[in-house]
Each structure stands twice: as structure tokens, then as C-alpha cells.
Image (spheres, rainbow, N blue to C red):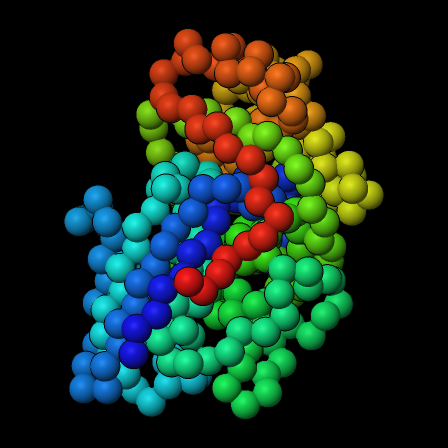
Amino acid sequence: MNGVATAPGAGTVLNALATGQGSAFAIDVETTATVELAADAETVTGEIAGAPDADTRLIERCVERVVDRFGDGEGGTVATDSEVPMAAGLKSSSAAANATVLATLDALGVDVVAGDNVAAGDSDDATAGDAITKLGACRIGVEAARDVGVTITGAFDDASASMLGGVVVTDNTADELLARETREWAVLVWTPPERAYSADADVDRCENVAEMADLVAELALDGRFGEAMTVNGLAYSAALDFDTDPAVEAMSHCHGVSLSGTGPSVVAVGDEASLATVRELWADRDGTLIETTTRPTGASIQ
């Protein structure tokens, strides 16, 4: 009873902390999860490659929730290996959860239906026998994240972008997909040396930018994602006390730039030529740069 799946990370268009509405886009860096189940195993044990002391409760809980729904009390092991840096605002938790859920479904022989072209309004987690939709699988990971307290909002925006690919707009208070489109962007990410955990974010300060978040949601639902993410980045950088200089440096050279999640990464999108200029500007800063692209397809069983 073995399963393997991958899921991409994501960047932020709209942070959901202020209003519960969020928007995110999948990027082509991914996490792989390998799950091995056995009927005689009593517990689930997790391991994160390269991080022996990391918290494994999320991936363990994802396995448990899938087994509770589709299995027969199986335990076993789950191991993740990721290109997505942890606690950097690039949705490493959502990618790990999605990959783990799909790998566990694979191990149990559960069909995952409704592919990457799922649109807003589609049945999200209706099942027929041993089957589940991709959004239904996404919700299992979101609930697992809430169970273990690694997210404030439930991160349905981040999770659905990772699961489905493309750019999504969601209502995280209802775990509802409002819109999904695809964009072909080059992506540049600057991540400073420090890390930030979304569960530690100052929600009260974020609620002060609710009017700006409403504007960002309007722009995103109108398909104006670049403008949306730039407004979001300025508002949330101020609310979460991050330096706006990297974003201001990039603004005139890219389609959009934002603080990703609750930071500390800043992500810019555009074409390769314009992002080359941004890369030169950001290269002098401490930290790391990731050059990638948006990803129209999301998580998948291998």
C-alpha cells in the first residue's frame, strides 16, 4: 500500500488574513510525498528530508484524515522532500499537505477525479464510491492544517492554487473557489535569511488593511492580478512590518510584485527580460533568489 504524489508551492496575490478572501498562483517548485501504509501499523510517522527536527504533525495528520475517510485504520510512514523553502511564504505547508493527501489516496487505491481544468462552482468533494475530486482532496489537507494549528485562515487559497494550478481566488471562510484562471509568467522570488511562520502573524494589524484587501479582491476577480498583488504587497508589508524597498525597486520592471503570504519572501512576476533587471537589483540583498515560472497544472499522483 504505497503512494507517491507531488504538489507545487505558490505565490500570493491576496493575503486572506484581513477579510477571509484570498488569491494565489502556483509556481514550478514542488514537494514530493511518499506514503507507505500497512494494516498492522498502529500509528503514522512522518519525516521531512533535510530537516530531522522539523514538525511533522501536518503530514501525519493528512494521512490520518485520509485513512479515517477511505481506509480501515491503517498506519505507516510518510516522507516529504521539497524544493519549497519552509516558513518563507511560498506555501510549503500547503504543498506538503496536498502531496501527502494525494499520496495517501494513491496508497489506498482511491480515484481522484476532476482535473486541472476544474472551474469555480464545480462539485468540490462529491464522491462516487472510492473516489474524490481534487478540491475534495484539497479540503482534507486544509482541515488537517487547521487541526494542527499551522494556519490561521485554513489557507484554502494557497492549497487550491497548489492543488489545481493556475491562479485562484477563494473565500477561505467557506472554503469556496470563486475563480480560477491561468497565466504564463516568469517568476522571481527573493527570500531573506530570516523566516516567518504564518501562525505567528499579527491578525489584528492585518485587519487594519481590510479596505485595501477588498480592493485587491475586486482587482483579482477582474483578472487584474498584477495590480492586485502589488497593492496587496504594500498593504501587508506595512501591516506585518516588512521592508517595502524590494517591492518598490521591482515595480517599474515587472507585471506585479508582492510580499508572499506572511513573508518574508517577495515574489515578482513578468516576462524574463523584465525580471532580469529585477534580479540585478535584488542580487545585492542578503538571502536567496529563485527563478521559476507559474504552473498551470497542480498537484498530481506519480
**In this figure, what is the number of numbered marks?**
0
Q: Quadrant of residue 270?
A: top right
Q: Where is residue 133 in the image (x, y as percent from the top left)?
A: 59, 73
Residue 6 in view (yes/no): yes
Q: In which quarter of the image is residue 69?
A: bottom left
Residue placed farthest to the right in the image?
222
Residue at x 64% of width, y 33% of height: 185
Q: Where is residue 91 in the image (x, y as percent from the top left)?
A: 46, 46
Horizontal side of 152 relative to 1 (left or right) equals right
Horizontal side of 70 relative to 2 (left or right) equals right
Of 97 and 261, the residue lying toward us: 97
Please, is residue 226 above or below residue 285 in the view?
below
Of 169 and 243, the residue lying toward us: 169
Of 82 and 202, the residue lying toward us: 82
Residue at x 62% of width, y 17% of height: 273
Q: Position of residue 117 (x, y in %)?
A: 68, 60
Residue at x 28% of width, y 83% of height: 74
Please, is residue 161 above or below residue 289 in the view?
below
Residue 21 in view (yes/no): no
Q: In which quarter of the image is the C terminus?
A: bottom left
Residue at x 71% of width, y 53% of height: 180
Q: Where is residue 175 in the image (x, y as percent from the top left)?
A: 62, 64
Horizontal side of 208 relative to 245 (left or right) equals right
Please, is residue 62 above or below residue 21 in the view?
below
Q: Quadrant of the N terminus?
A: bottom left
Horizontal side of 100 relative to 152 (left or right) equals left
Of 152 and 258, the residue lying toward us: 258
Residue placed farthest to the front in the image?
302
